[in-house]
Image (cartoon, helix red, strand yellow):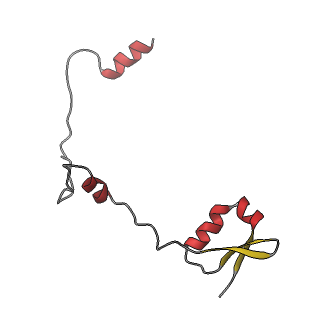
Amino acid sequence: MVLHQYTLKEFAANPSKVVHRAMSGEEDVVITLRGLPVVRLVPAAGPPPRTTIEDVWSAMPGMSVPAAPMVLPAKRITLRGEGPTAADMILEDRR
């Protein structure tokens, strides 16, 4: 088993690196002070559970997860009319 030691100064400079190393399951991640081991980091539990869209939807009152994925209509809608287009009106407004 490999011992991963970090001084308190190294830990203070980059704490996320040390914490992520401990969270990845590596044993014996130790922080030292004046050469003496003072803290040993171990993960509190397994990796945190991932939140899915189903979890979010289910937590909302009155909402349920659709049984099948939504399919958008393939037909394209075309708007036609008299007068200037929206782009023309925006350009005119900017003048």
User: Residue at point 34% right, 60% down?
Assistant: 52
Q: Quadrant of residue 28?
A: bottom right
- From the viewer's perspective, tell me whether residue 77 is left or right of residue 8: left
User: Residue at point 75% right, 72% down?
Assistant: 32
Q: Residue 38 location, x and y as percent?
A: 72, 73
User: Residue at point 20% right, 53% down?
Assistant: 70
Between 83 and 14, the one nearer to me in the picture: 14
Above or below, comparing residue 86 to residue 58 in the picture: above
User: Residue at point 21% right, 40% down?
Assistant: 76
Between 84 and 11, the one nearer to me in the picture: 11
Q: Quadrant of residue 86?
A: top left
- From the viewer's perspective, tell me whether residue 23 is left or right of residue 7: left
* Name of the residue lying farthest toward the right: 34
Q: Which part of the image, by quadrant, shows the N terminus?
A: bottom right
Q: Residue 78 location, x and y as percent?
A: 21, 32
Q: Quadrant of residue 95?
A: top left
* Name of the residue lying farthest toward the front: 38
Please tell me how many numbered marks the rendered image carries. Answer: 0
Q: Residue 84 location, x and y as percent?
A: 29, 16
* Name of the residue lying farthest toward the top: 95
Above or below, comparing residue 72 to residue 31 in the picture: above
